Amino acid sequence: MNVEIILFFVFSVCTLVGASLVVFANNPLTSAMSLVATFFFLAAIYVLLYAHAIAALQVMVYAGAVMVLFLLVIMLLPLQNTPLPLRPSPARWVGALSTASVLGALIYASLQWQKSLETLTPTTQTTTMSQETLMRFGNLEEIGLSIYTKWLFPFEALSLLLLAAILGAVVIAKARI
Amino acid sequence: MSASPSLASSMLSTMPASTASLPSFSLLEFQPLLPAAILAVTAMLLMLSEAFSVSKSRSYQAILAAVASVVAGFLAFQNTQLPVGLILDGRGVMDGFSSWITLIACFAAGMSSLLAFGFFRQRNAERGEFYGLLLFSAAGMSLLAVSNEFITLFVNLELMSLATYALAAFWRRSSRSVEAGFKYFILGAFASAILIYGVALLYGATGTTQLDMLHHQLPKALEDTPWLTWPGLILVLAGLSFKIAAVPLHMWTPDVYEGAPTPVTALMSAGIKAAAFVALVRVVLHVGDSSVVFLHLLSFLAAITMVVGNLLAIAQRNVKRMLAYSSIAHAGYILIGVAALFTANHLGNDVGVLSATNVANPTAETLRPMALQGILFYLLSYAITVVGAFGVLAAIEKREDDGAADAWDLNKLSGLATRRPGWALAMALFMFSMGGIPSTIGFLGKLYLFKAGISAGLIGLSVLGVLASAAGMYYYLRVIVYMYMKPSPETEMGARHWSTEFVLAASAVAVVLLGLLPGPLLDWLRQAALFAPN
């Protein structure tokens, strides 16, 4: 067991704890701050995956900008510390059951995947990359190159999407029409 | 000057190795995107017009939006003649199918902007942002039609959807409109999340997000990693089924269609439906051959969507809700055509009444163009008809009724034939066309779709479709009974506007004309369907 694996487990346990706190905390501020923690540990996992640029963006955009907005909204809302009633209802049971089954399916799938990776012969393991490609994989230069060449079409469509989203938000937030 | 080539080559050599693989896109590859570009640029102009406009009058906005749609539609029609192939490094595809869907999107956008002209003018709510969002939505539909890769498909689907969420909630004076926008947004975001989750799982299983490569990787992936591939495929199909409003995921449709301003409802039922179907067809064309499960799944979806949509529509007294449920039923009919795309490779797999029987020994080569032509013709005929039907509703809607519980009750239509004979005649034509009465375009749409279903051997499903549309005649004819046989109430009619009248007249003429003389249109569509890539 090397350092990477140990770090991965540390970070993933922290991510899960943070995510659970977001859901179960009574105080909305606790929830929001746990979300910040979750984002940070997620960024750390991205670093382990050699995706440094994504990790930096994760911290800057999500843990930074998005969370500031979250906190601003929480500040503006008149919130009491009343815990939400967790009454069992048919809808809740259906939700809990389907969530549990999706979780179970995903855990099963990842265990199977692990097993199949072990049985694969080295020749079929096409995903192994050289150390050099791995180092270049997540850096900004590579991302920029692929965005402006291979992924040009969706990237430009994304700018239209953002513009439409801004326009839509302005329309919704405007004085009554 | 002689130094420049060596300078260029020395610059090249110092650049990173990956720069050498810069793709060179030809101008031809951007041509399928041209309609969307026109729509998007006009949308930006309309957006800016609100900021910089000095004149009080906003009449030019709707006209500008309609003109842009006509220009984009004309370009899309020219694009149907382009050679077939992948564009932009495989992210997009250029074929007749996508160009025709773009044409339908432009038609829907142009018609609904004209409907909105009269509708919002009467309510003193004209805004450039509305037409801007409308054109952004149409641009999204058009780009969705050319997408050949999951990330691209997702981004363009979101462009279309986000603009439409805002459009549904645009008319904030009405609490129903806000409710519709909110419901559509929450459920639509949920469906998008499901779709992209499925895409992530499929990427994990096959290592690609490009549809044509997925086509080759999928059989191996289904064998090696079925517990990863199957959930991925199911989630992708579930996300797309939400957008076409197939039955287990149709719950949002009646509320959103009813609450949204009527011109927006026209856009949603004509344009979004066609664009969502092109995404579904593209995805299933590439994954459908890998397993017989898809045939069964699509047949089952088609059956319950037709039956449930029609049964729920019968119970409605609210005409707008009734049309919403009927649009679910129409999605079910089109799903027969989608299922017919795959029967050739899966004949003889018996699953009871929904199984495919071998009638005419069809091959994929003969069956696919037939089914694709049926789907395209049906989408076109439904778009023309439904724009007109919602146009009549928009025309009779009065300002005082906004937000009233009985705003679209059947009683509002009673005696329409004596008060507005032209509108009543047009509405009767649209109802005939939706029900599938001969000499209207809706009849031909059903004819070609069910013909494809029968040729594919989906006998049980096609019979069910015919029975379901016969049941549907009940609620379409009920509208005509109210218009022609009920006494007219004493209340005043709403104001008239030339653009609304134009939409009604144009759709009514198209319904009859294309219903009687479909020849050239059918030839074009056959050509488009023949060359759609597998």
Image: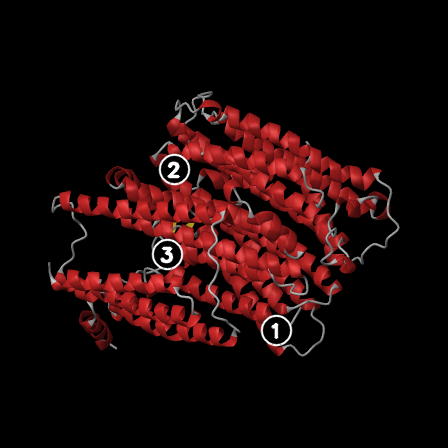
Task: Identify which amino acid the numbered label 1 is placed on.
Answer: Ser
B334 in relation to B127, above or below: above
B363 in relation to B134, above or below: above
- Secondary structure of the residue carrying tag 2 is helix
Residue B482, image quadrant? top right
**Residue B407 placed where, x, y %?**
74, 52
Instruction: Name the residue located 60 percent from the left edge and 77 percent from the top edge.
Output: B51
Q: Are marks 1 and 2 in contact (CB under 8 Å)?
A: no
Query: Which of pointers 1 and 2 lies earlier in the amino acid sequence?
Result: 1
B134 in relation to B242, above or below: below
Task: Identify which amino acid the numbered label 3 is placed on.
Answer: Leu
Horizontal side of A69 relative to B60 (left or right) equals left
- Secondary structure of the residue carrying tag 3 is loop
Question: Which residue is at the far right?
Answer: B490
Query: Which of pointers 2 and 3 lies earlier in the amino acid sequence?
Result: 3
The reply to whether residue B87 is visible in this rendering is: no
**Residue at mark 1 to residue at mark 2: CA–CA distance:** 46 Å
Q: Nearer the viewer, mark 2 or mark 3?
A: 2
**Residue B436 placed where, x, y %?**
65, 34
Q: Which residue is mark 2?
A: B288
**Residue at mark 2 to residue at mark 3: CA–CA distance:** 25 Å
Task: Identify which amino acid the numbered label 2 is placed on.
Answer: Gly
Q: Is disc 2 surrounded by few (<14), some (14 to 19) or many (20+) residues within 10 Å?
A: many
Q: Is disc 1 surrounded by few (<14), some (14 to 19) or many (20+) residues within 10 Å?
A: some
Instruction: Name the residue located 52 percent from the left edge and 32 percent from the top edge.
Output: B303
Q: Which residue is mark 3?
A: B88
Horizontal side of B504 relative to B444 (left or right) equals right
Q: Which residue is mark 1?
A: B49
- Pick the residue in front: A99 or B182: A99
Mark linked to residue B207: none
Instruction: Name the residue located 38 percent from the left edge and 64 percent from the top edge.
Output: A22
Q: Are marks 3 and 1 in contact (CB under 8 Å)?
A: no
